Image (cartoon, rainbow, N blue to C red):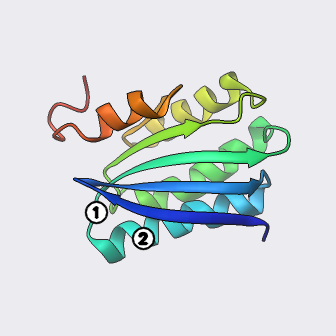
Amino acid sequence: MSYEIAVLERPGYLHIRVTGENTPANVRAYLSEARIACVERGFSSVMIEANLRGPSLNLVQIYSIVKEESTRAAPLVLRIAYVDVNPEHSSSNIRFAEDVAVNLGVNVRVFATLPEAAKWIARPANDAAK
């Protein structure tokens, strides 16, 4: 696999930074690592900062990954803030991923910037829906 992941503990959530190649295998792998890091460290909230090189995944790939990972994450990770910092990636594809995950019962929000994501994920759980 051609990606690197950094796990940073913040007050109330984990901040996951991932860099490398944007492939379905890498996305599945880093999402799995993020979930495992949350469980091992006792966090139910995570902010994912993705900076992956290469074209956006297509909608079929996105749907498949989100469907698989949603069933694994939902009972363990209660809130996910996601920021794709690669400006070349399709924002509509990222929003599609959010819609699929939300429809599958995952409390995930996509943000354009890290400060916006950090503000949302750091809020108490009962305020985070706002």
Q: Earlier in the sequence, mark 2 or mark 1?
A: 2
* Number of disc labels: 2
> In the rendering, at what x and y percent does residue 15 appear?
42, 53
Which residue lies at the image location 59% right of the left edge and 27% below the top edge?
Answer: 95
User: Quarter of the image containing the N terminus?
Assistant: bottom right
Labels 2 & 1 near each other (Cβ < 8 A): yes
Which residue lies at the image location 80% right of the left edge and 38% below the top edge?
Answer: 58
Relative depth, front residue between 76 and 7 = 7
Query: Which mark, residue 37?
Result: 2
> In the rendering, at what x and y percent does residue 116 appear?
40, 27
- Residue designated by label 1: 43
Residue ranking furthest to the right: 54
Instruction: Name the residue type under label 2.
Output: Ala
At label 1, counting other C-alpha atoms closer than 10 Å, the crowd grade (few under 14, some 14-19, many 20 or more) is many
Image height check: is 38 above or below 13?
A: below
> In the rendering, at what x and y percent does residue 123 appear?
21, 37
> In the rendering, at what x and y percent does residue 96 appear?
62, 29
Q: Is residue 64 left or right of residue 8?
A: right
Q: Is residue 43 left or right of residue 96?
A: left
SS state under label 1:
loop
Specify the quadrant of the image occupied by residue 69.
Answer: bottom right
Image height check: is 95 above or below 41?
A: above
Specify the quadrant of the image occupied by residue 105.
Answer: top left
Which residue lies at the image location 56% right of the left edge and 60% below the top edge?
Answer: 31
